[in-house]
Amino acid sequence: MKCLFRVLLCVVAVAVFYLPVHAQTTTFEVRIANHAVGTIEAQRKVSGSAKSITIKTRIQTLLAKINSDILNEYDNNVLTLAKSTRVAGKKGEDKETTTRRNGNDYTVMLNGARSVIDNTEIAHCVADLYFSEPKQVSRIFSEALGKFLPLHPLGSGQYELVLPEGKKNIYKYSNGVLTEVEVNHTFGRALFIKTI
């Protein structure tokens, strides 16, 4: 009987400590004026009720080099931590944002300036757009800006994310999978095209 108990205990321990981690990686090519200028690697890992998303963007043009990283952590599909860094190499263009859940609130640190988002749960972030079509979602939390942005469905699997300065990014899905993003940014119009 003791032997059976030990075997059962070992099986339970292995099952608990080695829960399967499901990982999904998607890669996009960044194109400006029909020229490849960089890549975006988006990775999502799920283990039980925990989820993490990492987005790594590397862009190199004649005028600029931009490295951007986003790391989101979720528990039961609610954001608990978001870290966003952007290094452009030009003074005043680098940005660092950390969003941390504290009870029912979130504390946002954007380049050293602290703000609080009261009484909310963040369930949908920009990073989530790389992995699932945002059906019936009207606002998305921007990890880089530390605030919610409006999201509008355009039909045919297309969604418009409205940025604070009025620019609009278009996310295009086919069968629920993101295939292309049209970005209107400071360096002009860019396309992110899914490669893997």
Image: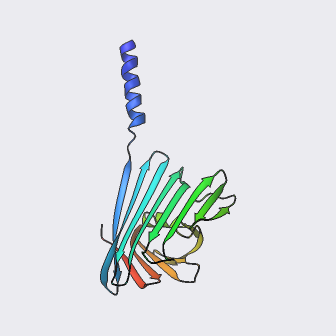
Instruction: Identify the image quadrant of residue 35.
Output: bottom left
Colouring used for the render = rainbow
Residue extending farthest to the right is 119
Q: Image point 34% across, 87% down: which residue?
A: 33
Horizontal side, residue 55 vs residue 96: left or right = left
Q: Image point 50% across, 46% down: which residue?
A: 49
Instruction: Identify the image quadrant of residue 60.
Output: bottom left
**Could you tell me residue 96's position as x and y percent?**
51, 66
Q: Nearer the viewer, residue 171 or 73?
A: 73
Residue extending farthest to the front is 91
- Of the 4 image quadrants, the one containing the N terminus is top left
Q: Could one spot residue 124 in this view of the protein?
A: no
**Could you tell me residue 39's position as x and y percent?**
33, 71
Q: Could one spot residue 34 in this view of the protein?
A: yes
Instruction: Identify the image quadrant of residue 132.
Output: bottom left
Q: Nearer the viewer, residue 137 or 29?
A: 29
Q: Image point 33% across, 67% down: which residue?
A: 27
**Could you tell me residue 28's position as x and y percent?**
34, 71
- Of the 4 image quadrants, the one containing the C terminus is bottom left
Q: Image point 57% across, 60% down: which residue?
A: 99
Q: Is residue 20 above or below residue 66?
A: above
Q: Is residue 140 above or below residue 188?
A: above
Q: Nearer the viewer, residue 7 or 64?
A: 64
The total of numbered circles placed on residues is 0
**Could you tell me residue 69's position as x and y percent?**
43, 65
Q: Is residue 77 above or below residue 192?
A: above
